[in-house]
Image (spheres, grey):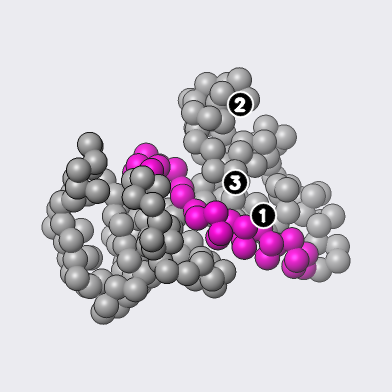
Amino acid sequence: MQQETGLEIIAEAEDGETAIELINQKSFDVVLLDVGLPGIGGIEACRQIKQQNPQLPVLVLTSHSQKSLIARLIEAGAQGYCLKGVAAEKLVLALRSVAAGASWWDETATKEIRSTFASDPGEPNSENISKLSNPLTQREQEILSLLAAGKTNQEIALALYITPGTVRVHVHAILQKLEVRDRTQAVVVALQKSLIR
């Protein structure tokens, strides 16, 4: 990874506590966190890092993709995660995506999250209620569906024949309406509430 152009490892930490200290001392563009860090652990480290630096993107490395773990990562504010052993170029792509403000979720996780929502429709009427109370416009739903498919603003702009600036405005509106901090949470909330298919 050190050979990769435009990527430079500024610091490495042995445990969660050191990671938090280092992040408070230096300026970083992106953080790669091992979920199994010694000490307070990766998830708690992620939570504390995001509390102190809400704008700093965090990508988490983990050895499994259990739904409960993914839910905790989202809750802790991670922008995404990769499974350990992922091909180097894919990890670099994930880091670049997260650093650029996009989210990155391993395919296994996305499938599992989708299947959870598909197999757990909630109360019998919840779907009709949520359809009635969907705060999103048709265009916002289209954009959110493309976000859920892992598309960047640029790709969404091309797909819908609008400018990336317009996409950003729509994404901002979606975050406001769903009362979430970032795109990943927007997708999770939208899937939970059946706002998008």
Nearest the viewer among 33 and 106 is 106
Q: Secondary structure at mark 2?
A: helix
For the point 44% across and 43% down, the residue is 102
Quarter-of-image position of residue 129: bottom right
Q: Secondary structure at mark 3?
A: helix
Q: Give percent across and percent down for residue 117.
A: 70, 62
Res. 148 mark: 3
Give how far apart the Cα atoms at labels 1 and 2 are: 21 Å
Q: Callout 2, which amino acid?
A: Ala
Marked residue nearer the N-terminal end (3 or 2): 3
Quarter-of-image position of residue 119: bottom right
Q: Callout 1, which amino acid?
A: Leu
Give how far apart the Cα atoms at labels 3 and 2 are: 14 Å
Res. 191 mark: 1
Instruction: Bin the neighbour count of mark 1 within 10 Å (Cα to Cα): few under 14, some 14-19, many 20 and up.
Output: many
Instruction: Bin the neighbour count of mark 3 within 10 Å (Cα to Cα): few under 14, some 14-19, many 20 and up.
Output: many
For the point 37% across and 55% down, the residue is 59
- What segment is highlighted magenta in the picture? 93-122
Is there a contact, CB below 8 Å, between mark 1 and mark 3?
A: yes
Q: Give percent across and percent down for residue 76.
A: 42, 65
